[in-house]
Image: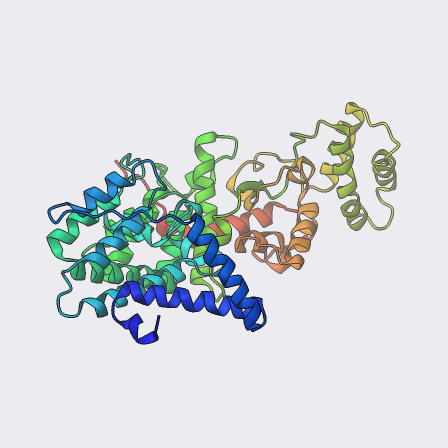
Amino acid sequence: MAEEDALRNIDFYHIYNASKYIEDWFKDAFEGDMNKIGASQNKLYSYMVDHLKVIWYEAGEDEDSTKMFTRLNIGRIKLTNAELVKALFLKSDSMVDDTYRNRLEISMQWDSMEKQLCSENNELWYFLTKESPDKYPTRIEFIFDLMAAKKSNEREEYYTFFWFDKAIKDRTAKVLWDEIVNNFLRLKEWYEDNRYYHKIGYLISSGSATMADIFAAAKGKRKSIFISCLDDMIKRSLDIQAESVDDYMELSYDKAKDKDVISKLLLLFNVESILTEDVYQRFPFSKYNTSEWSLEHIHAQQSQGLKAMEVQKEWLRIHLPSLKAVFPNGEEEALINAVEASCTASSQLSSSDFTDLFERVTTKLSDGSDLEYLHSLSNMALLAKSDNAALNNSTFDVKRNIIVEMDRRGAFIPYCTKMVFLKYYTPSADNQVHFWGTKDRKAYVDAIVNKLTPFMTFNEEV
């Protein structure tokens, strides 16, 4: 096919480009050797003549092509809503001013939007949704679902296609396509604007709202009103019927109903800190939404999950360097020797021996014996979920060393989690490198309150 033929219609355009790709592939595969290329093409031609079948169906003039296509393809390889919607636009005769030019423009714009939605690291995608990209083989379908207001529990497989089929008849393909492009550009604007990016990203990543909710909330609103609307949505996500800030600070990890709110508070604390401070980064929702996260005790003083002897020995091994760092002059030589002896491969560690060592080690690596704060917000941070019971039950200094090593390797650590373990919130005069003490917890809570008070709601006084 000649290049000038490619300009006659959209089908010829794609056929021409496909043939060029195949031609270039043959040249590269056989290094331009025309004899080998010719022989291979003859073999391919013979195979296609002998084995390739083409189904050709002549439709009558009065046939509804959409219904016919759906009927003929029942039980065969299913087309996606996106593919069916694309066909609606490309076959439409509503672009009467210059049909080919408009169809070619649609194809180019479609490819551009799809490419951006498939951007490296899926950063745009995971700003828009927590859904896996695997759910959308053609990602532009996500925008179609937004426009069609498709519910998550919608049972009609081709709901979006049927919505567009009707909308094109009501509004014409050209008008509707312009609306698709404008909606995509709006989503891109939200992604590129720091305020929109962080506020919307928090709502979606925390599970407090979907992009469909936000899309609907933005309809017909000025930017200033929309920002206020987002702030209201954030406030509702943290609503615990509190009387004062203290009610937020008294949320407890060991209460199932509180854990979700604590997770949202800490995620918002991270997001707001990055948004409002002079931080040259954005919160990476693409990394956050593709990992499992847990509420981590900054300083643990309980031995939950430390049942197997090897796990107990591992716990002793990872605490030994901290003991030696805190007591370098032999003050706790007997304890250090007992830990060293108990965590060797040949030692037999009884349950009672481990319990005794556990209590002695945690006491020495703790700032006081008060356990009231243990499950409170002042002792919680966000970390990637780990199945390692020894690490999960470690004291502050051990976890701090692990965080430093993770940071050195370039692992993603939420911004505020890193700040906690590096003692950025604690005034230098009060800093105790190896311990997570009362002053550290107070400084941490003060930082949280400072960032999140604008989003906390309180019951009105009666």
Residue 116 in sight from this viewpoint: yes
Labels in figure, total: 0
**What residue is drawn where x is 70% and y is 51%?**
401
Q: Is residue 367 above or below residue 223?
A: above
- The picture places residue 211, in percent across and down from the top left corner, at 32, 49
- The picture places residue 425, in percent across and down from the top left corner, at 56, 56
**Rendered image quadrant of residue 21:** bottom left
Residue 23 in the figure: left or right of residue 227: right
Residue 188 in the figure: left or right of residue 324: left
Residue 449 in sight from this viewpoint: no
- The picture places residue 145, in percent across and down from the top left corner, at 28, 48
- The picture places residue 321, in percent across and down from the top left corner, at 79, 47
**What residue is drawn where x is 79% and y is 43%?**
320
Q: Nearer the viewer, residue 94 or 53?
A: 53
Q: Nearer the viewer, residue 188 or 434?
A: 188
Residue 133 in the figure: left or right of residue 28: left
Render colour scheme: rainbow
The residue positioned farthest toward the bottom in the image shown: 4
The N terminus lies in quadrant: bottom left
The C terminus lies in quadrant: top left
Q: Nearer the viewer, residue 147 or 362?
A: 147
**What residue is drawn where x is 43% and y is 41%?**
248
Q: Nearer the viewer, residue 179 or 166?
A: 166
